[in-house]
Amino acid sequence: MTTIAKFAIACSLAMLPFTASAQTDDAAYCAALTKMYRNTASFHQTASTAVPVAVAKCAAGEPAAGIPVLEQALRNLGAKLPSRA
């Protein structure tokens, strides 16, 4: 194994905790957006088909697909987005 390959593997392993943390943070943020949308949107309001799909993506562990859609839907409702921190 070359020195470059060993270095690449070591860097990849070192980044795993940060990747897992980012995924956990994204999942929590996606859940917060989902909750906020459900509390903000009127029951009489018809959501675009993108919103239920985004909520389903969040629930399925795919927050990267759901976050932008939910953020835009909330902005369209005039809501202030929650903090990602």
Image (cartoon, grey):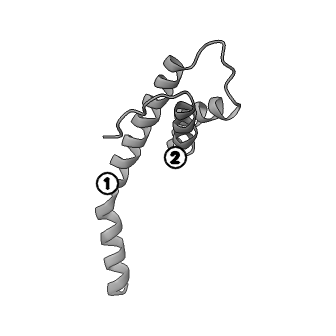
Residue 70 percent across, percent down from the top left: 55, 35
Amino acid at dot 1: Phe
Residue 53 percent across, percent down from the top left: 65, 34
Do callouts 2 and 1 mark residues in contact (Cβ within 8 Å)? no
Amino acid at dot 2: Ala
Q: Where 44 sits versus 31, above or below?
A: above
Which of the two labelled residues, at mark 2 and mark 1, occupies the earlier sequence position?
1
Residue 58 percent across, percent down from the top left: 53, 35
Task: Determine whether the residue tagged by mark 2 lies in a helix, strand or loop.
Answer: helix
Question: Which residue is depicted at the point 52% across and 25% down?
Answer: 37
In the rendered structure, find residue 32 and report the number of the disc placed on it.
Answer: none
Judge by depth and name the residue closer to the eye, 11 or 72.
72
Question: Which residue is depicted at the point 50% across and 41% down?
Answer: 63
Judge by depth and name the residue closer to the eye, 32 or 19.
32
Give the residue number, with chain letter if any, for mark 2: 64
Question: Which residue is depicted at the point 60% across and 35% down?
Answer: 54
Question: Which residue is depicted at the point 47% across and 31% down?
Answer: 33
Work out which quarter of the rendered image holds the C terminus and state it.
top left
Give the residue number, with chain letter if any, for mark 1: 18
How crowded pointer 2 is (Cα within 10 Å; few <14, some 14-19, many 20+) is rated as some
How crowded pointer 1 is (Cα within 10 Å; few <14, some 14-19, many 20+) is rated as few
- Cα distance in 3D space between marks 2 and 1: 16 Å
- In the image, 39: left or right of 3? right
Work out which quarter of the rendered image holds the N terminus and state it.
bottom left
Task: Determine whether the residue tagged by mark 1 lies in a helix, strand or loop.
Answer: helix
Tell me how many marks there are.
2
